[in-house]
Image (cartoon, rainbow, N blue to C red):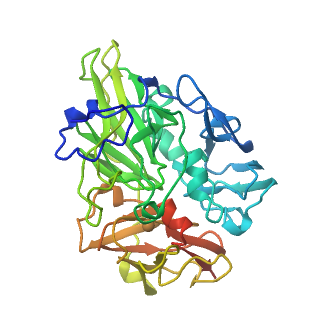
Amino acid sequence: VVTGAVGLISLTPILGCEPDNLNELPKSTDPQPLRIPTSISGGNIAASYGPAQVWPGPMTPALLLNGFFLGPTIKISKGAGFTSQFVNQLGEPSNIHWHGLNVPPEMDGHPMDSVTSGSIQYTFPVLNRAGTYWYHAHPDMLTGKQAYSGFAGFFIIQDQEELALQLPNGDFDIPLLIQDKRTSASSSRIDYTPNSNDIISGFLGNEVFVNGTPNAYLEVKRQAYRLRLLNGSNARVYKIAFDDNRAFSLIATDGGLLDRPYPVESVLLSPGERVEIIVSFEGDIAGKSLRLVSQEFQVAGSHAGAEFQQGQPLNILELRVLNSESVTYSLPTSLSNIEQLNQADAVREKVFPLTMDHSRSKNIHMIDGKVFDMHRSDYQIPFEELEIWEIQNEAEGMHSMHLHGTHFQVLERRFGPPMTPVDYGWKDTVLVNDNETVRIAVKFKDYRGRYMFHCHILEHEDDGMMINVDVI
Ligand SMILES: [Cu+2]
């Protein structure tokens, strides 16, 4: 299907591509072992621009955290105190947003709390339940560049409820930070160069990196694994599946465990979202190779003929089954209790239209008719009052809406596909499809002050698709 030089942007003609053909997709390198970031529980996080060993051979200019391309994994227990000194050596404004964590507003990484040099002290108690959270830069109009260049890492919380379930752990609990990049065989660069079309569609790549590894593979034993999938991409939505269409179990979404495991064969994951899945290789023969992939899907409003397409099939991670003893694993039938927010208890409803103004060359995307102004109060929600927010997508294409400072529940999808298990549980980010309306139940219960609601397609965010939400 694909001819020509490897790594070039020859992906457009792949229509009706069967999963088998994914093996033919261009790669910028031979398979490389999946990198696993080191774990820390706090301490310094220093950001700088410098050379990274992304591919074998020449170094790649990138953003380094503590000297590495992509940040360390923070692992910590619920109830602990977290302290980190962020040291900015980038020569441009930056800060850290703790995505999915309920932290005090002044610790949340609001763009107004960025520094151009020096450091920021982050200190907060870990209030959230066990789950797969993350951190990334959040400065005004530079989030896309810095996150793309490497400013991202996992923030994994454990608690007693989760540990008691004895889910696969240690070497069988694998974090996968998924990001697409624009690569070519002729250069070892991952430059961030969005043009005006990319500001509308988002900056999409042709090759998927996992934990900063291009063309990654992981050797797995013949037993069950817990995979923590984080879509850390600037703009790409993935239809996560295995190339043999095997079933797997969805056990957690953004804010931790679901009430029970949900068997699925694929799941849509939009920028900023996380899912945890259990997949077993106990029935696979030694030597088998399979792939975690993004399957092709159709997106209304995507531009035919564009070099990079939302919905194009992509390889994510090769899994190589080792010659080991087959170990059977049975998932618990129930995982957690989720308090269901009830629409009837809502104090008020608010509509947030997402719109576009094509007459502009920037500030194209708006929420509630507004372009981001970091000093303006856009919406006030009283502390501990339940509200229904209706997000109406009139802004063509997909948007991934993220709320800081709390978790919400998805109540209903209208004028689009029905809810799926990725919408269940506690969410901080939700995919809103073209022309769709998504209703969510929102309540802030930990802190008062200024938080944000924005699109997590980072080119949209940097373009101003963001508002301040004040908890009063
Ligand atoms: Cu958007």
Q: Percent position (x, y) of residue 2?
A: 25, 35
Q: Nearer the viewer, residue 468 or 2?
A: 2
Give the vertical position of 4 relative to 129 (above or below). Answer: above
Q: What residue is rendered at 59% in x and 44% in y?
A: 150
Q: Percent position (x, y) of residue 174?
A: 46, 34
Q: Percent position (x, y) of residue 457?
A: 46, 61
Q: Nearer the viewer, residue 93 or 274?
A: 93
Query: Can residue 120 be seen from the camera position used here?
Result: yes
Ligand 1 positioned in quadrant: bottom left
Query: Can residue 127 be seen from the camera position used here?
Result: no
Q: What residue is rendered at 67% in x and 41% in y?
A: 65
Q: What residue is rendered at 34% in x and 40% in y?
A: 332
Give the vertical position of 40 relative to 32 (above or below). Answer: below
Q: Is residue 383 left or right of residue 268?
A: right
Q: Percent position (x, y) of residue 312?
A: 29, 48
Where the N terminus falls, by quadrant?
A: top left
Q: Nearer the viewer, residue 185 or 34?
A: 185
Q: Quadrant of residue 49?
A: top right
Residue at the right extreme, as displayed: 118
